[in-house]
């Protein structure tokens, strides 16, 4: 087995295991920590796919900023395993069966597609380098880039307005 | 690496996210499951972009196929970050009003 294959399987198992632990753990703080593990595994996949820029952005934005925000809110509400909402056992089983059925449908549909069977993912190339990405971002996609800054500003203002205490 | 491996990994992560949204009652965990689903789709997008990159580069060396898809992933991340800030503000607001983050209490639109 090549080193990329070993790394792929290790990161894939880590991601799926982390996602399962995230969904099943009772304490919300542990959920956040497992989700950080999943994000690091996905960043590792990005590096394997030669998308270094996205890997770094994924770690900074998701594993760093967003997860700290989640952790902060959870600690602000003082939530732990005891304050976890009581849930119906049947609802749990139904949800698991529904999610598993969705996965089965996806896999069954994908097994029928013959065109994908012999396609290989090209690991090399320089499409993921910051230089090429930046060139495309600031020439062809400069308008969406600027609009996204407006989106961020409005989201920030919206969060402050929603979170403001009373009137 | 065959593209199938990446598709199955993304499908597994997405389905775990869907199952989490359906089973958990905690609004914050539901939000985190949505983030997981977004990340599964991002991973699939990057894998597909790398799959098509070789073909496109062979036909036209100045093609930006791989770059474009990775920029889409970048914009998905940007929108997700904005969404998280507003969503968490809404959850904090909800906690302040009903002192719980249980979505079962959200079955009415007003008191």
Image: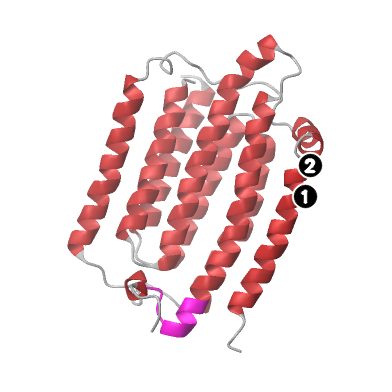
Which residue is situated farthest in the bottom direction here? A167
Q: Chain of mark 1?
A: A
Q: Which residue is painted at 32% across and 56% down in the image?
A: B22
Q: Residue under label 1, please give it.
A: A146
Which residue is situated farthest in the front direction here? B110
Q: Which residue is painted at 38% across and 45% down in the image?
A: A17
Work out whether residue A122 or residue B104 is closer to the camera in this orientation and state it: B104
Q: How was this image coloured?
A: secondary structure
Q: In the rendered image of this protein, does residue A146 appear above or below residue A55?
A: below
Q: Is residue A122 visible?
A: no
Residue A130 relative to residue A78: left or right: right
Distance CA(mark 2)–CA(mark 1): 6 Å
Q: In the rendered image of this protein, does residue B45 appear above or below residue A157?
A: above
The percent position of residue A22, horizontal first and vertical second, equals: 40, 55
Determine crowd level at label 1: few under 14, some 14-19, many 20+ residues with C-alpha closer than 10 A. Answer: few
| Quadrant occupied by the C terminus of chain B | bottom left
Q: Residue under label 2, please give it.
A: A142
Asked whether residue A56 is drawn in magenta, I would say no
Magenta range = B93-102
The percent position of residue B94, horizontal first and vertical second, equals: 47, 77
Which residue is situated farthest in the top direction here? B59
Residue B97 relative to residue A163: left or right: left
């Amino acid at each position: 087995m090549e080193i990329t294959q070993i790394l792929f399987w290790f990161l894939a198992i880590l991601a799926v295991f982390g996602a399962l632990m995230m969904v099943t753990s009772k304490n919300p703080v542990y959920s956040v920590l497992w989700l950080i593990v999943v994000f690091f595994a996905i960043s590792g996949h990005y590096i394997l796919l030669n998308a270094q820029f996205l890997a770094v952005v994924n770690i900074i934005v998701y594993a760093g900023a967003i997860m700290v925000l989640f952790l902060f809110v959870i600690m602000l509400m003082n939530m732990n395993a005891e304050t976890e909402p009581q849930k119906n056992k049947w609802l749990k089983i139904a949800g698991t069966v529904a999610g598993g059925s969705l996965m089965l449908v996806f896999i069954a549909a994908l097994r029928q597609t013959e065109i994908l069977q012999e396609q290989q993912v090209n690991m090399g190339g320089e499409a993921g380098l910051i230089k090429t990405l930046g060139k495309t971002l600031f020439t062809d996609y400069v308008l969406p880039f600027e609009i996204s800054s407006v989106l961020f500003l409005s989201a920030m203002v919206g969060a402050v307005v929603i979170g403001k205490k009373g009137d | 690496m065959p593209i199938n491996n990446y598709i199955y990994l993304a499908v597994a992560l997405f389905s775990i996210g869907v199952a989490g949204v359906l089973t958990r009652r905690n609004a914050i965990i539901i939000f985190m499951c949505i983030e997981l689903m977004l990340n599964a789709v991002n991973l699939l997008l990057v894998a597909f972009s790398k799959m098509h990159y070789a073909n496109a580069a062979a036909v036209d060396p100045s093609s930006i196929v791989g770059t474009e898809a990775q920029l889409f992933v970048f914009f998905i991340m940007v929108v997700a970050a904005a969404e998280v800030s507003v969503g968490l503000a809404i959850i904090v607001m909800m906690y302040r009003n009903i002192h719980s983050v249980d979505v079962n209490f959200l079955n009415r639109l007003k008191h």
